[in-house]
Image: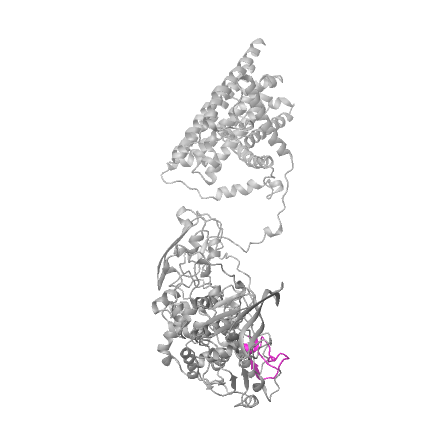
């Protein structure tokens, strides 16, 4: 029975991410367009909203190319290893009062740990492509993602210290409005390190399309490439929802059903900010990226944790 | 070269070096927020909608795509331009509208297929070349010596090095043809009952006679002189045109069935009215027989002669009593130069040539005056004749007045003189200022009209006169001109006669006029560094000090091999056959074209023709440069290939049809062509 429920929730998560990716790509193109003094998609559907409906069949019908010398099974299924953790991390997001799809006692740890599995998927795809540049891109992506795990975990830890529990529903129950100003720096660290974790601009060095032809997934095309892209958008959605819950109180902002609406709105705002940042700032250099992680974000997150710990003890 | 980093100074505004400590952090944060603010404000603004003009929708006529070749030397023969006489204009017109007319053919008044001649000579089919030329230029051997070759002026090769020697090739073809003339000349069948009489055996009359004989008419020609040729016989000096060439070519026409009656002066021996009664049509091709002499004081003195009379004497007697005398030729045209050179050859002690025009506006061809100056003629420019000074009825000098301007602003002849006078001493004064027709005897007893200035009334396009059935062509209609222009009028007159004899009007919508294309005049090309073998064959020429003494020919002709090599220099313009000239590769700004060829005289072929599309920038210069129009753009310019190797087009790929290719498979997409008017049916028989 629990297996059936699990399958059902898994399907729901995939649908959410697929739909979210479709809307997200459209919205990203709109944001990018406006930032660059353009309109973005306009031709298909009202305000170009059906653009992705046209793009998805295109991706589906593209030739499924496996490069010569590639490790074929790994090559074929590595995209799933990138996509699945993003979908799984949605399970512990506390959508409503006392309810999350998978309400674990270590939910927060689950959220921090599971998306890191996609590093393995990235390394797999890089290795399986049998391509020097893909391999290098994969290594860089892994180094970046593993490094940014640290400030990301530390920033979430400050909220957990305040709440005194790892269960997301309990964190939401304990949430107070003054946590927002108190953990705002922690939220910024969380946001920045999540952007780096998702390989989005300005931290998308491993997959810089124009310079490195997409790094670790250089050899992917068609729907397999689209799965990588959906994985990125899935991570974006999960991160935004989780951030909206832990740092902005999520459903606690409005009573009743309004709560889930408020959470989605906050999450959408976070997504928009992420896109805004991507289309505003140029890429960092790899060494700047690492230095920023270890010399700036980690100490800042530690200070935030200290502040939160002092406040928690004082209470 | 490595950049010296210490010397690179970055402006403060783009620096990423922030101050140390908290100040730097604040600066960094502020710059991040500034960036977000800029993009945020931009995103909040409504973007500008740009409306493109309607032309954006249409396909540009300069459609640029990958290249292709239409034809290749050795695989495709070039088309020869030939048609029955009345339909020839239609062929030329169609070629011209389709941008397929070679410049040499277009610029020739008679549209002689010089390209076809070069093709046939390079192929060693020389008698065919001669006959091809003869169908439009009735006297190839003669014109091969005296023509002013507008074809060579328009030759596309002028742009690259030197023009193809078209005129010397005419002459060479004539010389080769002489060896086989007898077996190739069979009388043209007379298929029609109507007969035509032609008065005068000059170039225009001969051209008309040939056209009419081809159409099946019986043609009779009357000539006053004991030898045929008209002005070619009486006027052209023998050092330029040996008379046997002229007589041979006229005899060929006789062999083709022309009834030539020499020493028969129409108007004296036979009245014109009799011809008009006996023949169904009469063509007056009498030319201009008299020199004009200015009615200035002293013009009737002893020692004043006309240029035509002098030339006649030179050609027929070889002597005009000039030995040891000072000769002054008045006039700056080709006839004046001929008269001056003849005077020199007849022993004149000193020959000067005086003309109204300045040195750079003399109406004669530049090479003529150049040769004359080489031989020792003195040119006195910007002088107008004022008075012949005489002593005892004999010429002693010519009083000349300085001329400040010959033509007015609109280009009309309106000389202005200054009050400066020069006396040029001379024993003989030759007037070469123009010619006039002598029509009184000829037209006696007919109703033909003569204008107040003594000119025959005739139509300048259809060559009809005031009496139906009587036509006129040549210089009697057009005024002094060149032999090839006279020949062209002969062809037109023959068409009119043909239409008249068939009972049709001489002009209706079916008659196609010859187009008058205008071609660029080329500046002298820089031939420095071009191998001697690539340049124009040089005609051997007698030394000036030798040739000034007698009337032997000056130019000595080309050998068989020289002629074939020269003919293969022809670029075969507009033939749509690649001739391996490599101009496309030399033009390409990206070095995208690789052309290798064998280029020995007589053998020229492409061995390699590669286009690297990865380098091509689609500028189209190669296709515009291509003299033969063999290189064209195709309809494919969506450059998607599975493999980079496919982006190099070899010869086979470039010769494929322009529609679909391996690159895109865009079958049937062809570049839009230049719009042409629909075919007009042309001249039917």
Q: Residue at x 41, y 69 (%)?
A: B168
Q: Is the magenta stretch mostly helix, strand or loop?
A: loop
Give x and y (percent) for residue B580.
Answer: 40, 59
Q: Is residue B671 above or below residue A304?
A: below
Observer able to see residue A301 = yes
Image quadrant in which the C terminus of chain A is located: top right
Give x and y (percent) for residue B56.
Answer: 59, 50
Q: Which one is in front, B304 or B281? A: B304
Q: Is residue A165 above or below residue B426?
A: above
Q: Quadrant of residue B597?
A: bottom left
Q: Which one is in front, B602 or B667? A: B602
Observer able to see residue A106 = no
Q: Which residue is drawn at 62% across and 50% down?
A: B53
Give x and y (percent) for residue B122.
Answer: 37, 67
Q: How many marks?
A: 0
Q: Give the range drawn in magenta.
A: B450-479
Q: Which one is in front, B265 or B521? A: B265
Residue A217 drawn in magenta: no
Give x and y (percent) for residue A219.
Answer: 42, 38
Q: Residue at x 44, y 38 (%)?
A: A220
Q: Is residue B271 above or below residue A212?
A: below
Residue sitting at the far front: B392
Q: Is residue B255 above or below residue B126?
A: below
Residue B463 drawn in magenta: yes
Q: Which one is in front, B171 or A16? A: B171
Q: In which quarter of the image is residue B631?
A: bottom left
């Amino acid at each position: 029975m629990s297996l059936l429920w699990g399958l059902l929730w898994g399907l729901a998560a995939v649908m959410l991410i697929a739909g979210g990716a479709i809307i997200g790509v459209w919205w990203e193109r709109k944001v990018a367009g406006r930032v660059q003094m353009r309109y973005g998609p306009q031709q298909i559907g009202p305000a170009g909203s059906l653009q992705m409906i046209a793009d998805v069949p295109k991706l589906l019908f593209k030739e499924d190319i496996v490069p010569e010398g590639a490790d074929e099974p790994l090559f074929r299924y590595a995209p799933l290893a990138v996509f699945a953790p993003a979908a799984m991390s949605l399970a512990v997001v506390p959508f409503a009062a006392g309810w999350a799809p998978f309400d674990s006692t270590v939910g927060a740890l689950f959220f921090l740990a599971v998306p890191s599995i996609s590093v393995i998927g990235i390394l797999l795809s890089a290795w399986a492509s049998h391509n020097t540049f893909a391999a290098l891109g994969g290594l860089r992506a892994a180094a970046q993602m593993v490094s940014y795990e640290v400030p990301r975990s530390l920033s979430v830890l400050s909220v957990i210290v305040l709440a005194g529990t790892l269960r997301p529903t309990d964190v939401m129950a304990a949430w107070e409005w003054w946590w927002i100003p108190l953990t705002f720096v922690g939220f910024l660290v969380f946001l920045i390190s999540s952007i780096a974790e998702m390989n989005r601009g300005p931290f998308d060095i491993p997959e810089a399309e124009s310079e490195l032809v997409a790094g670790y997934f250089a050899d992917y095309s068609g729907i397999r490439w689209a799965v990588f892209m959906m994985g990125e958008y899935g991570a974006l959605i999960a991160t935004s929802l989780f951030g909206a819950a832990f740092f902005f109180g999520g459903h606690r902002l409005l009573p009743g059903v309004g709560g889930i609406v408020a959470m989605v709105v906050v999450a959408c705002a976070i997504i928009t900010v992420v896109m805004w940042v991507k289309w505003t700032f140029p890429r960092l250099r790899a060494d700047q990226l690492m230095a920023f992680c270890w010399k700036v974000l980690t100490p800042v997150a530690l200070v935030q944790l200290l502040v939160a710990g002092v406040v928690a003890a004082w209470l | 070269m490595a950049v010296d980093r210490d010397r690179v100074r970055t402006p403060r505004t783009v620096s990423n070096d922030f101050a140390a400590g908290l100040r730097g952090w604040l600066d960094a944060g502020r710059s991040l927020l500034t960036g977000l603010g800029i993009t945020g404000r931009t995103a909040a603004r409504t973007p500008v909608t740009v409306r493109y003009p309607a032309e954006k929708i249409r396909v540009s006529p300069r459609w640029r795509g990958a290249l292709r070749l239409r034809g290749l030397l050795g695989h495709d023969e070039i088309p020869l331009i030939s048609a029955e006489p009345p339909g020839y204009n239609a062929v030329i017109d169609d070629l011209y509208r389709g941008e397929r007319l070679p410049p040499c053919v277009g610029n020739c008044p008679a549209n002689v297929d010089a390209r076809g001649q070069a093709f046939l000579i390079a192929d060693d089919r020389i008698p065919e070349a001669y006959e091809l030329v003869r169908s439009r230029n009735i006297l190839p051997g003669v014109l091969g010596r005296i023509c002013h070759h507008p074809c060579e002026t328009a030759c596309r090769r002028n742009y690259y090095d030197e023009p193809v020697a078209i005129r010397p090739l005419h002459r060479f073809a004539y010389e080769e043809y002489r060896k086989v003339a007898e077996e190739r000349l069979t009388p043209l069948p007379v298929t029609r009952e109507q007969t035509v009489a032609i008065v005068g055996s000059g170039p225009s009359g001969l051209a008309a006679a040939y056209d009419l004989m081809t159409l099946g008419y019986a043609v009779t020609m009357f000539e006053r002189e004991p030898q045929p040729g008209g002005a070619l016989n009486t006027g052209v000096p023998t050092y330029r045109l040996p008379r046997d060439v002229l007589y041979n070519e006229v005899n060929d026409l006789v062999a083709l069935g022309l009834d030539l009656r020499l020493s028969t002066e129409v108007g004296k021996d036979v009245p014109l009215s009799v011809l008009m009664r006996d023949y169904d049509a009469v063509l007056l091709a009498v030319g201009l027989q008299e020199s004009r002499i200015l009615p200035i004081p002293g013009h009737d003195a002893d020692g004043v002669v006309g240029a035509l009379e002098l030339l006649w004497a030179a050609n027929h007697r070889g002597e005009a009593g000039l030995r040891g005398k000072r000769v002054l030729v008045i006039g700056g045209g080709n006839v004046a130069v001929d008269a001056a050179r003849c005077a020199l050859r007849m022993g004149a002690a000193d020959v000067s040539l005086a003309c109204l025009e300045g040195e750079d506006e003399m109406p004669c061809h530049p090479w003529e005056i150049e040769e004359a100056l080489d031989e020792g003629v003195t040119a006195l420019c910007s002088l107008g004749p004022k008075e012949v000074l005489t002593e005892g009825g004999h010429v002693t000098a010519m009083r000349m007045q300085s001329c400040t301007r010959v033509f007015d602003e609109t280009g009309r002849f309106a000389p202005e003189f200054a009050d400066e006078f020069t006396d040029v001493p001379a024993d003989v004064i030759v007037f070469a200022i123009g010619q006039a027709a002598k029509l009184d005897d000829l037209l006696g007893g007919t109703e033909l009209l003569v204008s107040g200035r003594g000119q025959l009334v005739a139509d300048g396009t259809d060559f009809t006169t005031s009496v139906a059935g009587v036509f006129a062509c040549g210089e009697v209609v057009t005024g002094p001109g060149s032999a090839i222009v006279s020949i062209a009028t002969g062809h037109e007159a023959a068409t009119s006669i043909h239409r008249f004899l068939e009972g049709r009007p001489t002009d209706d919508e079916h008659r196609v006029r010859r187009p008058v294309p205008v071609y660029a005049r080329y500046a002298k090309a820089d031939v420095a560094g071009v191998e001697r073998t690539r340049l124009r064959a040089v005609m051997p020429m007698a030394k000036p000090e030798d040739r000034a003494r007698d009337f032997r020919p000056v130019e000595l002709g080309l050998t068989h091999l020289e002629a074939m090599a020269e003919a293969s220099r022809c670029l075969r313009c507009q033939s749509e056959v690649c001739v391996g000239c490599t101009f496309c590769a030399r033009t390409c700004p990206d070095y995208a074209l690789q052309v290798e060829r064998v280029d020995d005289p007589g053998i020229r072929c492409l061995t390699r023709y590669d286009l690297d599309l990865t380098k091509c920038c689609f500028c189209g210069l190669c296709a515009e440069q291509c003299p033969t129009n063999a290189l064209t753009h195709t309809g494919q310019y969506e450059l998607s290939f599975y493999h980079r190797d496919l982006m190099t087009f070899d010869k086979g790929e470039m010769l494929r049809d322009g529609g679909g290719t391996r690159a895109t498979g865009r079958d049937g997409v062809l570049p839009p062509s230049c719009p042409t008017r629909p075919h007009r049916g042309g001249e039917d028989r």
